Image (tube, rainbow, N blue to C red):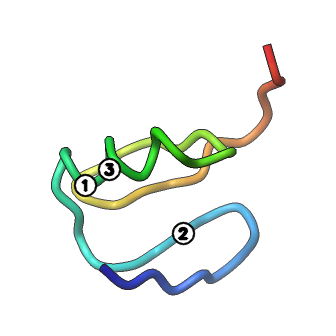
Amino acid sequence: MVFAETSSSDIVGTRLTLDEYRAIEQTSPERHEYRNGEIITMSGGSEA
């Protein structure tokens, strides 16, 4: 699995399966959205 970071807010890379996304999301300090196999960093939000 390889990611190329284009900016601090969006991650663009290879298409991921839903299971791969879930595994990454469990350990990530940031929240992401899964769209058609791509992970997009969610903007805003708070610790709560």
Which quadrant is the N terminus positioned in? bottom left
Determine whether label 1 and label 2 are within 8 Å by CB.
no
User: Vertical placement of 44 versus 34: above or below?
Assistant: above
Point 36% across, 45% down: residue: 34
Judge depth for marks 1 and 2 and give the one in front.
1
Cα distance between the residues tagged 3 and 2: 12 Å
Q: Residue at x 59, y 52 (%)?
A: 41
Q: Residue furthest front?
A: 27
Q: Residue at x 46, y 74 (%)?
A: 12
Q: Residue 2: horizontal and vertical position, in percent? A: 37, 84
Mark 1 surroundings: few (<14), some (14-19) or many (≥20) residues within 10 A: few
Q: CA distance from mark 1 to mark 2?
A: 15 Å
Q: Nearer the viewer, residue 19 or 39?
A: 19
Secondary structure of the residue carrying numbered label 1: helix
State left or right for residue 21 relative to residue 17. right
Nearer the observer, 43 or 21: 21
Mark 3 vs mark 2, foreground winner is 3
Question: Mark 3 touching mark 2, by CB under 8 A?
Answer: no
- In the image, taking residue 19 as reference, residue 34 lies left or right, namely right
**Which element type, helix, strand or loop, lies under badge 3?**
helix
Q: Which residue is mark 2?
A: 11
Query: Which residue in the protein does label 3 denote?
Result: 21
Question: Which comes before the other along the chain, label 1 or label 2?
Answer: 2
Residue at the spot of label 1? 20
